[in-house]
């Protein structure tokens, strides 16, 4: 159960980090992607542009959350394997306790 909690914490942290990174990077990308070429003025349907831009931002945040969760799942599995191997190595290094002999 402890391993499942650790993996879930890694997944949630990765998803949150992915959403934050997407929220930070995507507005610049959307601004660049929606620029008019050659600096000409264009007429546009502003409510439609706002709706499309908001939908794109939300979808990219979902993608960022999924990618972050997947990457941190792999990191969580590696972390669990590393801690398990370290604990197993320490268990091998400690000698078993010896019981004191009773003297007759």
Image (cartoon, rainbow, N blue to C red):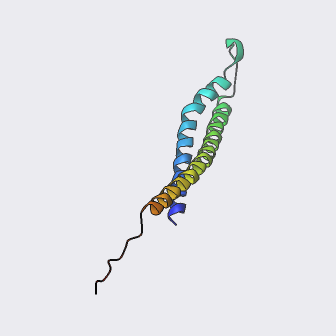
Q: Position of residue 11 (x, y in %)?
A: 56, 52
Q: Position of residue 79 (x, y in %)?
A: 53, 51
51 vs 3, left or right, is: right
Q: Position of residue 77 (x, y in %)?
A: 58, 54
Q: Is residue 6 visible?
A: no
- The residue closer to the viewer here, 96 or 10, is 96
- The residue closer to the viewer here, 67 or 32, is 67
Q: Count numbered badges in the picture.
A: 0
Occupied quadrant, residue 24: top right
Occupied quadrant, residue 41: top right
- The residue closer to the viewer here, 18 or 62, is 18
Q: Residue lying farthest left?
A: 104
Picture layout, residue 77 above or below residue 17: below
Picture layout, residue 34 above or below residue 48: above
| x 38%, y 71%: residue | 97
Query: If the image is split into quadrants, where does the C terminus sit?
Result: bottom left
| x 48%, y 62%: residue | 92
| x 53%, y 46%: residue | 16
Q: Is residue 86 visible?
A: yes
- The residue closer to the viewer here, 15 or 76, is 76
Q: Residue lying farthest bottom?
A: 104
Picture layout, residue 49 above or below residue 67: above
Q: Position of residue 73 (x, y in %)?
A: 59, 51
Occupied quadrant, residue 71: top right
Picture layout, residue 36 above or below residue 79: above
């Amino acid at each position: 159960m402890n391993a499942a909690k650790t993996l879930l914490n890694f997944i949630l942290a990765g998803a949150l980090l992915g959403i934050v990174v997407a929220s930070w990077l995507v507005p610049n990308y959307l601004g660049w992607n929606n620029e008019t070429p050659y600096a000409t003025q264009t007429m546009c349907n502003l409510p439609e542009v706002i709706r499309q831009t908001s939908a794109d931002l939300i979808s990219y945040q979902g993608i960022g959350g999924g990618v972050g969760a997947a990457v941190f799942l792999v990191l969580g599995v590696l972390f669990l394997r590393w801690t398990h191997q370290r604990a197993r190595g320490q268990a091998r290094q400690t000698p078993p306790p010896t019981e004191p002999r009773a003297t007759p």
